[in-house]
Image: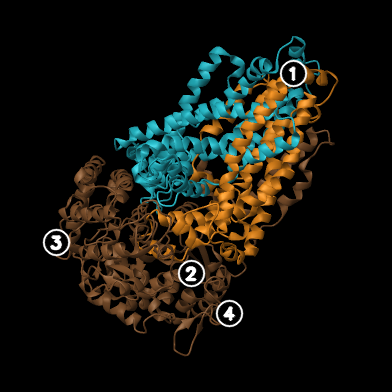
């Protein structure tokens, strides 16, 4: 009960300066007590008193009443690559003050504590408007009511959003209501093997013969035999991710606990993937690879991602989710030519569409302005380019061939804004292409998005609220077994999969599956 | 009011006498009130289903539902066992090694050497567990670790896959914990040792006691109150585990869970995707309650033997 | 004679312990100067086949941030430690008086704070809404670090066991005020524990990064641990399989192993240099206390 006053804080009698004064008072009293009770000759911290009175910038009153103010919370690292964020913020405001009379505060949060920061800010009812949402936290954000409904706002202010996204926008609705706006990027994706071109040529590998994951065995064998004992043909794309998590032939229906087989193209039966024959066969395959030495032995604990491993000449290939232009992106990261060969068709499902999105916080004081700003992110070329590549002639320059690249004398580390998160900045199709990309990249991506197969459950989002106890327990079991099994360390014939499944059942996975199926059926019936 | 009352009144006099003491305690108590007590009201979150549209205060009460996941699997038993056993080992070995190191430091007469030893022994305290995990990995990695590459071949032992063999980890984790905290523990004991009045030793020397006898009969008994204080405080934290040590150092390796999974890591992994503040508050509440009960019991026991040494 | 043998044995054992404590730091230092490809292919080594300062060049690009972060750390450590030490010592001094009304309750109340905390969200709400410390330098000083019940208990137990109660009584009979007794008698006799608690509190401030993480969205008041840890935590977070398929691409552009080692070195080496100066007072405090007692 004591905390009631605390929490109501800012909307009742409590005003900032008042409480600051009390705070200062407590400190001063404290210091005085030291002085009064002390003898005077000892070391008193009295000299520190004035410092408590120094003004902190957070308390300076806002003078500009007129423009709406919104906060855009982005996650980013704090390496030198984002050092110029304040300049970007100023440049954003040059655009937004002019066009929508809105002042934007760009705040960069660490990846590792983004969700936590958002939760804290929401708890404290702090200024927060645009929230970066990804497909793993989307459902829980909605179930805790952290996001507001966007339907009316988009109808009113979001014509650019609707135009840019088309019917993919509605694929994100929960119970017929929109809570997020997906960014425009690869809304459909495939899974692919990516290999170093130099070694592919050296061993005369017939890339046309690689159609699915099983075709990789002879390739890996050849490279392993040629390169020797300490070379591992298959490496992980990112440490902490299993090999099989990059070969997905099912619709994960959110968290992949209960999936639709065959990408959900032809059925709507929720099954536990780990129980299927398909899973067992794949585990057998990677286990054979592991035993044969095709996979690096410390794959479950390695600290290196694909770029450093391939760069260091330690590996040859890795599996990853891919999109048009992926080979160029990987080539940039590795610093050597990479070939990308799709192993699965392009598929759109809810997870792929909602991979990166923007939502508006339930605590937003200016949802109108936030929607207007979001609309600009989907329709204003200058704003999108600014967010993606920075300030012209400082962070990038458009060269004669039409591609953007660093200005002379600037490189990736010295630029100050090479966030490289174009896919998160609204409609990146409006931004110029970076040097090295295929000239028709945006068209290719658009085409893939339009022609991709669509899961029958596209648009269904599982609400896990009623089973979160079970979900927490199952997540814990998965973190124990997944890497071991799916990286090939365990022999599927040893009964480890059965053990894994049994533990998940004990944790209540059946209840999750039943709930998921029920929600999916209800959703299909309403459609 | 106080000043007006009769000076002959003894109780009022003693109150006046003591008033400055209360005044001196006030800043610390006020700080603890705000920093530690007021937020305790927020434990109510553990019993709520948080809905940000309603706000935290108005969210629905859901009883013990947030606690259920802690006991949902059979792992709950393993996790509890691990947490308790590790902490018991840490407390015991922390005391033993801390006291021994403090005694050894006390034997060093050269100030320069003492400074050197203290600096180095305390230095592990300065690095975070993440950084520690990197050099543990440098030692233990199967392919490029120094132990597998350099040391085991010398001894003629086959290489060991450290990160998939749970049986080694109780030792590795305990060693790392002792390594990191030994400096910290030893300086607390050293401070007490140094504070012991030299009269005791002089008297003992006159009686012909050797230095080692002095250590056993004077230094150690005088260390007991400090040891008990530290012991009790650690008992209160027995249900908490250092997340960095148990998550970062074993590199989150699933194969090691049977010996490395503790409450804090379980909660982290379980809630990573769900991110429910009610459920994480529930875990904290559970940990606090168990620690609270244990500390009350151990204090009662200690009170029985020696009232002076009990904490309260 | 026995003392000499003891000293020799002690030195020998301590030397071994010391070396085991320093070796990892040497490994860190060498790792940070090793070419990253060498780390991946050959592993960490005390004698790498190829040296490189690339990691420091990378970090050097953000020198301004680092220096600012160091200044914040130094200020908060000095200020917080001094203030916290005085408040804690005064509180502990009060708790020593068994005959004081409510003494047992107060003792218990202080101890209780070691066991229970309200959790992050309520604490955050109180500090941000009642005291408005978000994005101020105070965020690095006040929450959770200033007074620690554990340290108060340490001080109390020292005051109680190592200072003869008769000294207090004698002073009071002479007419000294409580403040005088505390500052003139209690504190000078307690230098060892004050030095110890001061050291521990200083370390806690130096190593603190959670406050910065929760209460600062503006990086202006980031301390050195915030700057360094944020990068490490982000890397680890992305490596724990979160953030979907984006993780691999984000990680691909993140710093490499040698940079991580360099980060650790930058966070540790300065304190290893500052520490001996600080320790001069610590050792002095300890030995002075010993002589006087």
Chain letter of disc 3?
A
Q: Which mark is residue A380?
A: none
The residues bearing labels 1 and 3 have C-alpha atoms spaced at a distance of 83 Å
Residue at 15% over, 53% down: A277
Residue identifier under label 3 = A267
Q: Quadrant of residue A133?
A: bottom left
Residue at the disc numbered 2 = A419
In this rendering, the label closer to the viewer, 1 or 4:
4
Given contact means CB atoms under 8 Å apart, are the residues at marks 4 and 2 in contact? no
Furthest-left residue in view? Answer: A266
Which residue is identified by label 1? C165
Q: Residue furthest bottom?
A: A400
Relative to A125, does residue B281 appear above or below in the rendering?
above
- Mark 3, Cα crowd under 10 Å, few <14 / some 14-19 / many 20+, is few
**What shade does chain C have?**
orange
The numbered mark 2 sits on a residue in which chain?
A: A
Q: Are marks 4 and 3 in contact (CB under 8 Å)?
A: no
């Amino acid at each position: 009960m004591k905390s009631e006053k605390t929490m109501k804080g800012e909307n009742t009698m409590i005003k900032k300066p008042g409480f600051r004064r009390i705070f200062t008072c407590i400190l001063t009293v404290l210091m005085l007590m030291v002085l009064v009770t002390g003898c005077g000759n000892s070391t008193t911290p009295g000299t520190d008193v004035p410092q408590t009175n120094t003004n902190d910038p957070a308390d300076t009153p806002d003078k500009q009443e007129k423009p709406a103010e919104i906060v855009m919370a982005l996650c980013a690292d704090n390496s030198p690559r984002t050092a110029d964020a304040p300049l970007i913020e100023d440049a954003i405001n040059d655009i937004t003050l002019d066009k929508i009379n809105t002042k934007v505060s760009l705040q960069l949060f660490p990846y590792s504590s983004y969700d936590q920061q958002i939760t804290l800010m929401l708890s404290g009812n702090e200024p927060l408007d645009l929230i970066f949402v990804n497909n793993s936290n989307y459902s829980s954000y909605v179930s805790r009511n952290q996001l507001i409904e966007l339907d009316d706002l988009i109808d009113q202010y979001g014509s650019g959003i609707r135009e840019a996204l088309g019917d993919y926008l509605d694929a994100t609705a929960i119970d017929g209501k929109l809570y997020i706006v997906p960014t425009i990027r690869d809304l459909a994706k495939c899974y692919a093997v990516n290999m170093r071109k130099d070694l592919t040529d050296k061993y005369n590998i017939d890339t046309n013969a690689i159609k699915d994951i099983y075709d990789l065995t002879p390739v890996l064998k050849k490279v392993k035999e040629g390169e020797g004992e300490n070379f591992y043909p298959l490496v992980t794309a990112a440490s902490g991710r299993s090999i099989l998590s990059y070969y997905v032939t099912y619709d994960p229906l959110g968290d992949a606990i209960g999936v639709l087989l065959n990408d959900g193209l032809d059925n709507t039966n929720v099954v536990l993937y780990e129980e299927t024959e398909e899973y067992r066969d794949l585990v057998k395959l990677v286990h054979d690879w592991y035993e044969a030495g095709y996979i690096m032995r410390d794959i479950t604990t390695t600290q290196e991602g694909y770029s450093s491993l391939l760069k260091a000449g330690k590996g040859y290939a890795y599996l990853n989710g891919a999109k048009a232009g992926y080979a160029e992106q990987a080539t940039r990261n590795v610093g050597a030519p990479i070939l990308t060969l799709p192993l699965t068709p392009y598929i759109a499902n809810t997870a792929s569409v909602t991979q990166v999105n923007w939502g508006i916080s339930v605590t937003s004081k200016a949802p109108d302005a936030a929607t207007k700003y979001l609309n600009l992110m989907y329709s204003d070329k200058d704003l999108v380019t600014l967010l993606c590549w920075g300030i012209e002639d400082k962070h990038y320059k458009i060269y004669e061939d039409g591609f953007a690249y660093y200005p002379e004398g600037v490189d990736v580390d010295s630029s100050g804004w090479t966030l490289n998160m174009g896919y998160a900045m609204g409609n990146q199709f409006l931004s110029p292409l970076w040097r090295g990309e295929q000239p028709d990249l945006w068209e290719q991506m658009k085409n893939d998005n339009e022609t991709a197969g669509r899961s029958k459950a596209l648009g269904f989002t599982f609400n896990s609220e009623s089973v979160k106890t079970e979900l927490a327990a199952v997540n814990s079991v998965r973190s124990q077994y997944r890497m071991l099994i799916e990286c090939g360390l365990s022999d599927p014939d040893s009964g480890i999969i059965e053990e894994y499944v049994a533990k998940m059942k004990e944790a209540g996975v059946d209840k999750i599956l039943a709930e998921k199926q029920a929600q999916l059926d209800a959703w299909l019936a309403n459609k | 009011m106080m000043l007006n009352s009769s000076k002959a009144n003894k109780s009022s006099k003693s109150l006046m006498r003591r008033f400055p003491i209360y005044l001196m305690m006030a800043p610390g108590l006020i700080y603890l009130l705000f920093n530690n007590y007021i937020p305790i009201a927020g434990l109510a979150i553990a019993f709520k289903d948080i809905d940000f549209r309603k706000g935290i205060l108005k969210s629905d009460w859901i009883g013990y539902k947030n606690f259920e996941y802690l006991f949902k699997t059979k792992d709950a038993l393993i996790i509890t066992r691990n947490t308790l056993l590790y902490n018991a080992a840490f407390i015991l070995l922390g005391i033993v090694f801390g006291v021994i190191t403090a005694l050894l430091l006390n034997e060093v007469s050269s100030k320069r050497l003492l400074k050197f030893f203290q600096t180095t022994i305390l230095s592990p305290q300065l690095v975070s567990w993440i950084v520690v995990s990197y050099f543990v990995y440098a030692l233990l990695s199967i392919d490029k670790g120094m132990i597998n590459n350099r040391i085991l071949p010398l001894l003629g032992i086959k290489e060991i896959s450290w990160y998939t063999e749970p049986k080694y980890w109780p030792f590795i984790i305990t060693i790392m914990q002792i390594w990191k905290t030994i400096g910290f523990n030893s300086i607390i004991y050293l401070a007490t040792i140094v504070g012991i009045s030299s009269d005791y030793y002089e008297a003992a020397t006159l009686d012909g006691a050797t230095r080692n006898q002095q250590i056993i009969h004077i230094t150690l008994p005088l260390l007991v109150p400090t040891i008990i204080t530290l012991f009790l405080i650690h008992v209160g934290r027995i249900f908490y585990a250092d997340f960095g040590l148990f998550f970062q150092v074993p590199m989150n390796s699933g194969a090691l869970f049977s010996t490395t999974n503790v409450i804090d890591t379980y909660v982290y992994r379980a809630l990573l995707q769900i991110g429910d503040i009610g459920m994480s508050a529930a875990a904290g509440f559970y940990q606090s309650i168990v620690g609270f009960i244990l500390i009350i019991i151990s204090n009662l026991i200690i009170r029985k033997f020696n009232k002076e040494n009990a904490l309260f | 004679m026995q003392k000499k043998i003891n000293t020799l044995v002690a030195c020998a054992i301590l030397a071994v312990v010391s070396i085991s404590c320093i070796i990892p730091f040497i490994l860190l230092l060498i790792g940070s100067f090793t070419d990253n490809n060498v780390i991946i292919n050959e592993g960490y080594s005390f004698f790498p086949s190829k040296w490189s300062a690339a990691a420091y060049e990378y970090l050097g690009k953000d020198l301004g941030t680092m220096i600012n972060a160091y200044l914040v750390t130094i200020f908060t450590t000095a200020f917080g430690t001094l203030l916290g030490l005085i408040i804690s010592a005064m509180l502990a001094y009060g708790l020593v008086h068994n005959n004081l009304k409510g003494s047992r309750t107060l003792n218990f109340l202080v101890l209780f704070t070691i066991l229970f905390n309200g959790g992050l969200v309520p604490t955050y709400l109180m500090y941000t809404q009642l005291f408005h410390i978000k994005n101020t330098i105070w965020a690095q000083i006040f929450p959770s670090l200033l007074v620690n019940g554990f340290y108060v208990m340490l001080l109390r137990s020292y005051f109680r066991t190592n200072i003869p109660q008769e000294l207090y009584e004698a002073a009071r009979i002479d007419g000294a005020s409580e403040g005088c007794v505390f500052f003139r008698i209690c504190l000078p006799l307690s230098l060892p524990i004050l030095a110890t608690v001061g050291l521990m509190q200083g370390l806690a401030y130096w190593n603190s990064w959670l406050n910065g993480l929760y209460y600062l969205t503006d990086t202006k008041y980031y301390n050195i641990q915030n700057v360094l840890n944020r990068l490490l935590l982000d890397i680890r977070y992305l490596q724990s399989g979160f953030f979907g398929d984006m993780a691999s691409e984000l990680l691909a552009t993140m710093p490499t192993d040698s940079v991580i080692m360099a980060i650790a070195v930058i966070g540790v080496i300065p304190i290893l240099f500052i520490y001996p100066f600080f320790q001069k007072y610590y050792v002095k405090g300890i030995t002075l206390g010993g002589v006087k007692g």
